Image (cartoon, grey):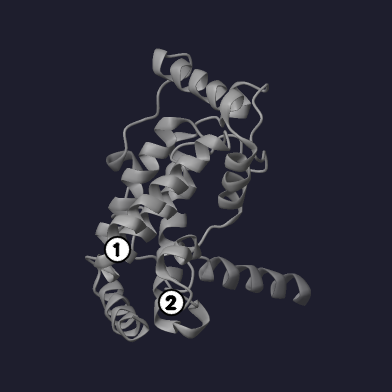
Amino acid sequence: MRRTLALVLAATVLVAAKPGPAGPLLLNEANFDPALLLPPPPADGSAIAKAELAALFVVDRTRTPAEEARAKTDNRVKDVTIFAAIMGPGFDLDRLPATKALFQTVRAEEKAAADRAKDHFLRNRPWIVDKTLHPCSTDDEPQSSYPSGHATMGYAMAAVLADLVPTKAPAILARAADYGHSRLVCEMHFASDVTAGQTYGMLIAERLMQQPAFQAQFRAAAAELQSFH
């Protein structure tokens, strides 16, 4: 009986801690509803859906081994280090604790928001629609295609990082676009999934920047990155 109670209490603590390093989510079901922020994905069997599938078969035939390798690398990396080459060799998050904390918050917030959207729209992944595709991986949930979580993360982090370092904004946003495109090269998503991820990620960044707690983290990171540059 005591063991059962202990397990229940432990599970309760884990659930309570789930939102991430920032504590309770700043963006939640009440103030950030994907049903009000994103259009539904193209319906199965619609002309747009068929065109999107046909475009993935073009990718399947034309992607080069180098393009596929880069896309597979992007498939594995899900944090702000996707912008490390742009930021320069000194962009070491272990030496930039305020910046690291800021982007841990962005990651926790955008991941929770993307998961809510995926659970709402329940779009089939491309390899579920057509099993003859060759995606980089089939480990993701089968009905989690819309919006692209990688694109959501890439653009949310890009928008915040571009605000922190405006001189590098064009290169940062170009990298986010390339990161989103890798989802098509990997055949992990349809084009509208990536477009929705771009929209959603930028909205997440905008709404986070309106939150006083996030603004405080942003100011600390901005001060830290001034000394970095």
Residue at the spot x=47%, y=15% of the render? Answer: 50
Label 2 close to label 1 by CB (< 8 Å): no
Q: Is residue 60 above or below residue 2?
A: above
Residue at the spot x=51%, y=21% of the render? Answer: 53
Residue 220 shown left or right of residue 96 in the figure: left
Q: Earlier in the sequence, mark 2 or mark 1?
A: 2
x, y (%) of residue 138?
Answer: 67, 38
Q: Nearer the viewer, residue 140 or 1?
A: 140
Q: Quadrant of residue 129?
A: top right
Nearer the observer: mark 2 or 1; the answer is 1
Q: Nearer the viewer, residue 115 or 151?
A: 151
Q: Amino acid at mark 1?
A: Ala
10 Å crowding of disc 1: few (<14), some (14-19), many (20+): some
Residue at the spot x=51%, y=35% of the render? Answer: 184
Image quadrant occupied by the N terminus: bottom right
x, y (%) of residue 206?
Answer: 25, 58
Q: Is residue 152 above or below residue 51?
A: below
x, y (%) of residue 200?
Answer: 34, 47
x, y (%) of residue 78?
Answer: 53, 58
Say which element carries label 1: helix
Q: Nearer the viewer, residue 10 or 222?
A: 222
Quickly name the residue at label 2.
Answer: 101
Residue 55 shown left or right of residue 98 in the figure: right
Camera sees residue 142? yes
Residue 95 shown left or right of residue 207 in the figure: right
Residue at the spot x=43%, y=46% of the render? Answer: 178
Quickly name the residue at label 1.
Answer: 162
